[in-house]
Image: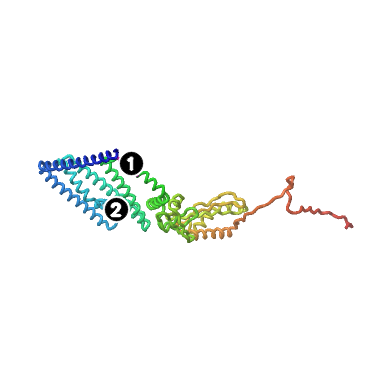
Amino acid sequence: MTVSNTAAAAEQAASNSSEALEVQTRAFFTDASLWVQSHWLQILIATGIAVGVVLLLYWLRSWGTKLCQRSDGAMGWGTIIGRAVSRTGSFFIVMLAVRLVSNYAAPPAMLEQTIAFLFTVAVVFQGAIWAREIILGAIEKKTESENYHGEALLSALGLIRLLVTVALFAIALVVVLDNLGVNVTGLVAGLGVGGIAIGLAAQGIFADLFAALAIIFDKPFRRGDKVMYDQTVGVVEEIGLKSTRVRSFDGEVRVIANKQLLDKEIQNISNREHVRIKLPVGVAYETPPEQLEALPAMLTTIVEDAGGIIARASFESFGASSVDFALWFDIPGDDWPTAHKVRDKVIIGVLRRFAAEGISIPYPTQTTFTADPAGKLILPYPEVQPVRRVDKEPGER
């Protein structure tokens, strides 16, 4: 009995809904007919104005297309705006023209609500399209100005386009549903939970991806730069979506994840102005003070003759076996082979000058002293008795 009553109630509700829709449709056409009869002149004028607006907007869209074609492939802000304008849809153009003239023609309330809703849908989705083109155009302009090329960049831009498109159109859909009176709280919560789940499942991939984008746009280094991190020194060969490949100076290719690479201290040595060489120099304690005083000027002359620029030539400390000097000098440029040659000249020059001046670089030496339990020094060789002279009397043997 209960099932039969429920089915009957459902059938009655469907019948009532069908009747209500029929009544509303009949009322809509009746009001529209009366409106056309009473406002035909306003309708004609509004239609003419709307046609003019549509033609103007189509001309603006064609102007945007021509602006893109005149850019010769270079990505500038004019090209970005032109590309966004060229993506203007016909549905938006028509609805914008209708919305602009609808108040003048004074349409019925139901027709006015329909125009307002369709105009909202057109504006929301057209705004999403414009925002996508401007964002992607700005990214492409940034990468083009920094001369980034390659499959990795194309893949990154494709993924960025997908993410931006999904995000913007999801927001647009939520806005449209909200204008329809739909409760979007649950939908927004579901999208948030789904996004969190996807992010947790692929956090490693996304971490390396965003690290690759950070490398591309923040520019800590570029392809072809010489970098140094940890114990690796080499040239960047490729920046991929997940990893970066560095050709070390030893010859092998080092592959490291982008996120792990950015977590390290990276030294970009491609654009440095000079190479600094630090050489410790020790001289014997027996060197006369006059020669010690002249040593900084002597080292400066040796460095300048070899092609270096002196940074420091001064006393450092008293070492275990020598008086230590700090010799620092710079070689212009970032070429290590050239720097090594200058360093070798400086080393040979120091040895040659020290030999001419009689200055010795001592070996590390150590002296051991031995004492008895009482603290008296024990010599490492037998103590020799002193020889005393004895004068003899005549006749003695």
Closer to the eye: label 2 or 1: 1
How far from the left and from the top, in percent, is residue 291? 58, 53
Residue range highlighted in magenta: 183-190
* Quadrant of image for the N terminus: top left
Residue 75 is labelled as none
How far from the left and from the top, in percent, is residue 272? 44, 54
Residue 76 is labelled as 2
- Going by the numbered disc 1, the residue's amino acid type is Gly
Identify the secondary structure beneath mark 1. helix
Nearest the viewer among 49 and 19 is: 19
**Figure label count:** 2
* Quadrant of image for the C terminus: bottom right
Q: Quick one: label 2, few (<14), some, or many (20+) residues within 10 Å? A: some
- Going by the numbered disc 2, the residue's amino acid type is Gly
Q: Is residue 245 visible?
A: yes
Q: Is residue 187 magenta?
A: yes
Spatial CA span between label 2 and label 1: 41 Å
Residue assigned mark 1:
186
Q: Main secondary structure of the magenta part?
A: helix
Could you tell whether 236 is left or right of 371 in the image? left
Nearest the viewer among 162 and 337 is: 162
- Proximity of marks 2 and 1: CB atoms separated by less than 8 Å: no
Q: Earlier in the sequence, mark 2 or mark 1?
A: 2
Nearest the viewer among 102 and 304 is: 102
Could you tell whether 388 is left or right of 68 in the image? right
Colour mapping:
rainbow
Q: Residue at x 45, y 51 (%)?
A: 260
